[in-house]
Amino acid sequence: MMNSNLKSKSTKSIEFLAKYDELKSKNNRELDPFVFLLSKLCEEEETKEYLAKNAKDKADKSGLALASHSRVISQLPAPGAKITMQDFTELKDTLFKESKMMTATTSSEILRKALQEKPNKRNVNIPPQPDWLFKRPSLTLDFIVGVDEPSDQNIVPLSSMSVPAQEHAILDDMLNCMQGIEGKYILARALTERYAPKEFMLDQNLDPSLQDLVRRILPLCCNYSTVVRFIEEKSAFEYGLVNQALSAAMRTLIKDYMVLVAQLEHQYRLGNLSLQKLWFYIQPTMKTLDILASVANSVNKGECIGGAVLSLLHDKTSGLVGDSKGQDLCLYLTQSASVPYFEILEKWIYKGIISDPYSEFLVEENETINKEKLQEEYNDAYWEGHYTICRERIPVFLEQVANKILNTGKYLNVVRLCGRDVQCPCAEEIVYTVKERKYYEQIEKAYEYSSKLLLELLVEEKELMARIRSIKHYFLLDKGDFIVQFMDMTEDEMRQDMENITPTRLETLLELALRTSTANIDQFKDDLRVELLPFDLITQLFKILSIETKKEKEYKVDPTDLHLSGLESFSFDYMVKWPVSLVLNRKALIRYQMLFRHLFYCKHVERQLCSVWIGNKAAKMYSLHSSKWYLAAFALRQRMLNFVQNFEYYMMFEVVEQNWLVFQQNMENVSNIDDVLAYHADFLNTCMNDCMLTDPDLLRIVHKLMVVCVTFSNFIQRLSLSTAVEPESKPTRESSLQANSKEHREQAIKEKLKTKVGLSTELESKPTRESSLQANSKEHREQAIKEKLKTKKFLSYNMDVVAEHVDLMMASENFERTIANFDHNFSGKLIDLLRKIMDLSSESGHLKLLNILYRLDFNGFYKEKLEAMSAEKAMMESSIHSTDSGSTGSWPTSSFTSQRPETAQYVPSIHKQRPSSNSSS
């Protein structure tokens, strides 16, 4: 129906049908869907008009012509006709456009596609053919053709014979031709093509009635020639086991055919055979050889090998539903040809072994990808690429279960590589039938057995979940006491440059932290390793995110150009053995590492801010006048600490823990290893996505926020060291922050310090107080009380000196400006982060990120600024819209003071019901 529709609408219907038949004979599976698409396009006029307009626009833009070649040729003048200069110019321009179009099409499309398409080379080791096969050309069942004339000059011409004599002579020739031997009056022509049908020359002096009978019988000889040529050619090694089995089945039928010819020749010798009887006797055989020749021609035209041959035979068998004998014949051929294919299939689905010497099976093995690379390369290519499906080798009747066939053998192959002997209890011989349900059930049983066997091996014997849980303890900071203890031990090491760190010392500290924490009960703790990577987290993530993009070259940085500290390069690694490495491969471990480095750095920033909080407690010893200068710094530190802690809580409890619970529930109902891989990859991908590791813009903002927090912590810690109170130490060094009235302040400090030194000398010259337990007399007690009062007075006076020194530093404009800059940078970056989260949530519907927004803005502190930014954005959009529509008015552009339109709202407020976990905070 589709062909008739296209034929009626095509200007070249005959060529279209011829091309369709040619492609159909080559067993092209995409042909019918493509023809269906063309038929639908022909029915839609709007689509046709759009395609024509699009082609015309592209041609006009490129300066090309859309005229067909035949139309251009028709414009050429007739030979010998006169042509004017104007006609010559127009013809030249037309030909130039046409040639330009052909060149452009060839170079930009056809050539590019040809270069991109990889040649499908079969990886086979073909044994050499023996030399005698080529030295003996007469060793064949087909016609041996020399010349197109009879070689025997003593042949009696048919014109001198009577009709009965002619029939007797032509019967002898027919029996010879039926065996592939030329006769005296019937000669075989030489082949014009490799797979062309055999043609014959018949003596024209033969009686017309006999000629008619002979021409009816000659197609039998032609089909015989086609079949025996196919048998002899496809029996070679390079055509595979399926073609060899098909050739063997045809050879069996040819033997039966030869028996028939021998019986006919016997009747001929007895004088009981005539052309009419011959025509009657060969009727069943003519049908048989016609089917065999049709199969041979189809295989030859399509150059079919392996599964493609079985697909062709299956279609032939299914197409002969009304012809029971023809269907039985094709069924016999298909069953015979499928025997070696099903033997490979049985060995694959019952034992996990692929034995395919001529690359015919639907599963292809890539030996370059081995399981050792699972721990080396950032991919899971072994599981996905070591065994793959070759689409053109799948028989039609196995297409629906091709993936199950692939997975069944893969599962058993993994079990075999673990040293186990595989014995499938449901192993049965698979035989081709027209009804596909029978071997579908056998494949389904083998699949269930193999998936259950591998899953038991991984989950029960190799303790897969326990290993994944162990990795979660360390990489996702599940063991809090271990990670705190480890960070305390390695604090000095992390501050050094990566080149100065000794990995063995880190390994020792790691083992000590493991043995002295709750991680000591983990049976897989010895598989944890320390690794110093030559790039930081941001560089690593951007290199992965920029793969196959325009920015890929920007992140190809030489690792020697990066000067990293131990903290920036540090990461955990984990030793995984086969077959657990199928799940915990290098790709999965690197994603665990990126999550760990992200969480580890956030934990480091929190520790730095907590250190600042501990150091700031010394400000309580200062007078009220001195501590007021710390108020702005205290408030900023608290805001930073609130951000970091809420960010950590969001990642560890609202992302990691929730996804972990989902992963555990999925693993309880898992049925095969492919589902395990999918659930595990989904767990890691969701964690990375919700932790903002897959969005470059969010990642940059978070990184800048962390850098601001660390820089602020370092600044405050240096300041605290410079103002530390040590009663017996030397005078504190002059603060670099002092800017105004420097000389006056220096003089004041010197006078205070002179007083301090004098009091200290006086105090040290007196004897030390005696112990109250040893002082029995009243005088001794009074003396001790006086000494304590003097010491307390001295310390109070000394604190006043340091407090005044702090006042001098804090009152400077540099300190105020520095704190203000930190506040400005932190607030600006944090608002950018919240705004980016709002935009991303509204655009992509990613509502998970709104949880962190609710946490950071639980009291609406940033709400006004975010609403003002939303208002400004709405104003700009309204201004652009009014400008496009011709309006002269526009919204003001000031950010926080301008009037907001009523439509501008704080985006999270549209979610009326917040999550319960956030409302509690």
Image (spheres, rainbow, N blue to C red):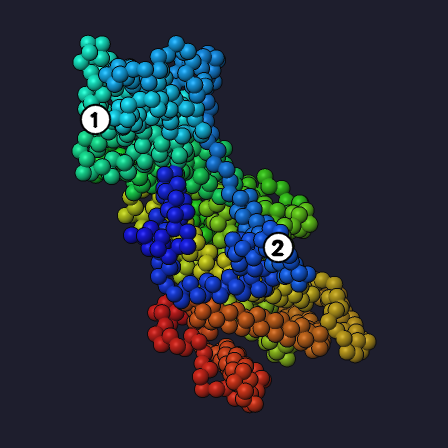
Amino acid carrying mark 2 in the image: Ala
Residue under the image location 46 percent in, 82 percent down: 904
Taking 646 as reference, is 743 left or right?
right
Residue under the image location 64 percent in, 58 percent down: 83
Q: In this view of the protein, can residue 13 be seen by the observer?
A: yes
Where is residue 404 drawn, in percent x and y? 31, 40
**Between 228 and 517, the one nearer to me in the picture:** 228
Where is residue 5 drawn, in percent x and y? 33, 55
Residue 749 versus residue 360 in the image, above or below: below
Residue 725 versus residue 623 in the image, above or below: above
The residue sitting at the bottom extreme is: 889
In the rendered image, the quadrant that contains the C terminus is bottom left
Q: Mark 2 falls on what kind of element? A: loop
| Crowd band around label 2 with a 10 angstrom C-alpha radius: few (<14), some (14–19), many (20+) | few
Where is residue 901 drawn, in percent x and y? 48, 86
Q: In this view of the protein, can residue 569 be seen by the observer?
A: no
**Between 867 and 491, the one nearer to me in the picture:** 867
Q: Which residue is mark 1?
A: 283
Real-space Cα separation, disc 1 to disc 2, in angstroms? 62 Å
Amino acid carrying mark 1 in the image: Gln
Q: Mark 1 falls on what kind of element? A: helix
Figure disc tally: 2
Taking 430 as reference, is 855 left or right?
right
Give the image quarter of residue 779: bottom right
| Crowd band around label 1 with a 10 angstrom C-alpha radius: few (<14), some (14–19), many (20+) | few
Q: Which residue is mark 2?
A: 81
The residue sitting at the right extreme is: 743
Where is residue 806 drawn, in percent x and y? 68, 73
The residue sitting at the front extreme is: 160
Residue under the image location 44 percent in, 30 percent down: 193
Residue under the image location 64 percent in, 80 percent down: 625
**Between 395 and 281, the one nearer to me in the picture:** 281
